Image (spheres, rainbow, N blue to C red):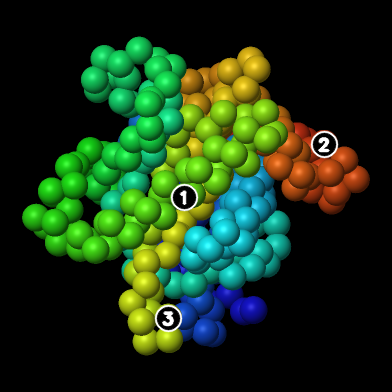
Amino acid sequence: MKKGKKLYEGKAKIIYATQDKNLVIQYFKDDATAFNNQKKSTIEGKGVLNNRISEHILANLSQIGIKNHLVKRLNMREQVIKLVEIIPIEFITRNVATGSITKRLGIEDGTVLKEPLIEYCLKDDALGDPLIAEEHIYAFDWATKKEIEKIKKMILRINDFMVGMFRGIGIKLIDFKLEFGRIKINGKNEIILADEISPDTCRLWDSVTDKKLDKDRFRKDLGDLIPAYTEVAKRLGILHEQSNVSAVNITKLSTVKKKSK
Ligand code: 5GP
């Protein structure tokens, strides 16, 4: 598949055109950002791990009937995905309260929620992805009621599946962010899961020690981000000791180059 011109560059990924107008290439960068772009770094090897982990999770979600944009992984850093019109909402699902919700509402860190809580944020970097109510989505036509009902059902199914998948490998799925897109399939409008699911977009804690195995290692300056992401990939059965993308190779790439504070 030939890579065409760059269509979009985000904080962690680049989208390129292909010769097929319905397909694009998603390139996973090593860049890490946090706190509305105020903290930036390049963490060598992160893109490679997220590409593999996201491919693994999306492929598994496909198998349980969750339609998503993944077509196939091309190489270490790229995957072919279906071009969708992204709905401008970040869908946050929480099983345990931590991060922004604890500060916003004064909830004790680590509080286990009775049932999964879905929050909506407007996808707008300039505004800092503000939290919005479901009513805002309809008031400003960001999505229809039918679309949100469909997405909520998909989210709960995705959460159920991922909680179980991670529990099986000794990891607690604390919370995560999803994005969805509109696409026409055989002339019919559909909503499919888009973007990525990786330790960049999920909070993952070791079941026994509560060790953070996700992007909070960068946000909170905990260090050892690559070993943590590698641990997630190994437990998912993606990386094997003899693999070309072995933990050792990735750990060798793990020098953190600070761009700015
Ligand atoms: P919080 O609202 O506590 O900062 O984040 C909740 C969850 O959503 C975390 O798993 C976090 O990684 C994810 N999340 C929220 N917003 C973003 C974002 O803009 N980028 C990424 N990569 N993850 C996000």
Figure check: 133 above or below 83: above
Q: Viewer-nearest of labels 1 and 3?
A: 1
Three-letter amino acid code at the position of disc 3? Ile
Return the residue at label 1.
Answer: 157
Q: Element type at marker 1?
A: helix
Disc 2/disc 3 C-alpha distance (Å): 42 Å
Q: Give the x, y percent position of residue 21.
A: 46, 83
Secondary structure under tag 2 reads helix
Determine the image quadrant of residue 213: top right
Instruction: Tell me how far mark 1 sits from mark 3, CA to CA.
Output: 22 Å
Classify mark 1 as within 8 Å of ligand 1 or not, answering yes or no. no
Left or right of 180: which side holds 133?
left
Q: Is residue 129 left or right of residue 220?
A: left
Instruction: Determine if residue 121 is in view.
Output: yes
Q: Which residue is mark 3?
A: 185
Q: Measured along the vertical axis of the image, is residue 251 above or below residue 15?
A: above
